[in-house]
Image (spheres, rainbow, N blue to C red):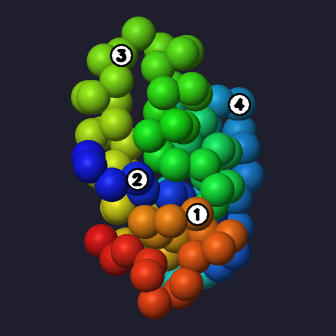
Amino acid sequence: MSDKLYVARSSQIAARRLDDEMMIMSAVDSTLFTLNETATFIWEAADGSTSLEDIVTHKICSRFEVVESEALQDAEEMVRQLAGHGILLLSDEPLAAANPSRQVTP
């Protein structure tokens, strides 16, 4: 992945943590998602100002025995799927300063 990808949680959801998993309901299409432990780490770190690459490096690779390039590829696929359901927002720049017209769509 050559460009940084920033992720933020959408405000159009309802979410609750149950043990190591996150349950999320999309207000857009009423779809219910259950995130596993790894995806929950990404979800909780998705603050809009931290790049996905940094989240994977510091939250995933430091905790699990995984190759960084593979973890990043899997994480990107997962966040794009969630963005497609309106669960996450994606941008090529930090979302706090992002211009809405620059948001990435899946």
Residue 83 percent across, percent down from the top left: 43, 68
10 Å neighbourhood of mark 3: few (<14), some, or many (≥20)? few
Q: Nearer the viewer, mark 3 or mark 2?
A: 2
Q: Amino acid at mark 3?
A: Val
The correct choice, above or below, for 74 with respect to 78 in the image is above
Residue 64 percent across, percent down from the top left: 47, 14
Q: Nearer the viewer, mark 4 or mark 1?
A: 1
Q: Amino acid at mark 2?
A: Lys
10 Å neighbourhood of mark 2: few (<14), some, or many (≥20)? some
Q: Give the SS element for disc 1.
A: loop
Name the residue beneath numbered marker 2. 4
Closer to the chain start, of discs 1 and 3, is 3
Name the residue beneath numbered marker 1. 94
Q: Nearer the viewer, mark 4 or mark 3?
A: 3
The correct choice, above or below, for 66 with respect to 104 in the image is above
At 65% from the left and 73% from the top, the residue drawn is: 97
Q: CA distance from mark 4 to mark 1?
A: 30 Å
Q: Amino acid at mark 1?
A: Pro
The correct choice, above or below, for 68 with respect to 46 in the image is above
Name the residue beneath numbered marker 3. 66
Q: CA distance from mark 4 to mark 3?
A: 22 Å
At 40% from the left and 53% from the top, the residue drawn is: 4
Q: Quadrant of residue 98?
A: bottom right
